[in-house]
Image (spheres, helix red, strand yellow):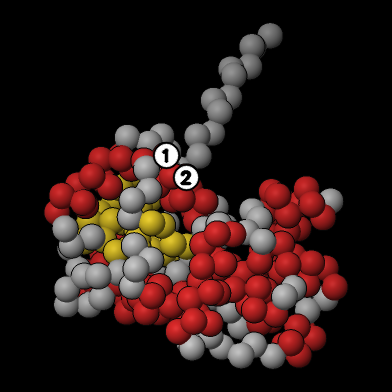
Amino acid sequence: MTQRQPTPETTPAPIRVLVAEDQAAVRSGLVLILRSAPGIEVVGEAVDGEQAVARARALRPDVVLMDVQMPRLDGVSATRQVVAEGLADVLVLTTFDLDEYVFGALRAGAAGFLLKDSDAARLVEAVRTVARGEGLIAPAVTRRLIKEFARSGTATTADPSVLAVLTPREREVLGCLGRGMSNAEIATHLTMAEATVKTHVSRLLGKLELRSRVQAAVLAQELGV
């Protein structure tokens, strides 16, 4: 009787990251951190926005780590192109001192925002979070966005009637997004499977014509959902 050979466990594919940052020293540091992290592969680097878009088209990474202040084409414009073409999810590097860049990246469909002074562990976790399809929407960051939108007069006057297209369950999920919950946290909170949460998030984004969970979180807080 032939003995069956054990089947090797399937190793998940690494998260493929493109790092776009014009400062060589900063870029090298980001690349070093990411290359040291298990399950993450840096597939390319870009020194400006135009190169970021071109390399995203050529390499099709899972995540683009995008600085907002870059020559030739700024990070906001580059993010808009990458998102519009469906090339990758974009994680924006920001200081939060330049509000217009943050707002622009939000509208462009960035999947998350990461402070430039974040430590290595936070950087790695941010990349993994975005790669899972979960926007980096820490409650403190979202509240800051809302506050700055209101202070600068750039906030949109959200009409509560837009929520009419959502089912009661989708409204509950939207409220959870506004509180910065991950899919796993939403699943626990609402007692449903994580896969079901992903479906609800995808559907509500489509119905509300939003590009990212970050936009959904801001809308939820604007409307008090």
Compared with residue 62, is residue 159 higher up or lower down, i.e. above or below?
A: below
Q: Where is residue 117 shown, x and y percent of the image?
A: 33, 51
Q: Where is residue 7 shown, x and y percent of the image?
A: 58, 24
Dot 1 and dot 2 residues touching (CB under 8 Å): yes
Q: Quadrant of the C terminus?
A: bottom right
Horizontal placement of 169 versus 85: left or right? Answer: right
Farthest residue to the front: give it. Answer: 151
Can residue 87 be seen from the camera position used here?
yes
Q: Which residue is mark 2?
A: 125
Horizontal placement of 112 versus 6: left or right? Answer: left
Q: Residue at x 61, y 90 (%)?
A: 157
Q: Residue at x 21, y 52 (%)?
A: 27
Task: Classify 10 Å Cα crowding around label 1: few (below 14), some (14-19), many (20 and above).
Answer: few
Q: Quadrant of the N terminus?
A: top right
Q: Disc 1 marks which amino acid?
A: Ala
Can residue 199 be seen from the camera position used here?
no
Q: Nearer the viewer, residue 45 or 114?
A: 114
Q: Disc 2 marks which amino acid?
A: Glu
Q: Looking at the rendering, which quadrant does residue 196 occupy?
A: bottom right
Q: Looking at the rendering, which quadrant does residue 211 occupy?
A: bottom right
Compared with residue 2, is residue 177 higher up or lower down, i.e. above or below?
A: below
Q: Residue at x 85, y 73 (%)?
A: 168
Q: Where is residue 160 shown, x and y percent of the image?
A: 74, 87
Q: Which residue is mark 1?
A: 121
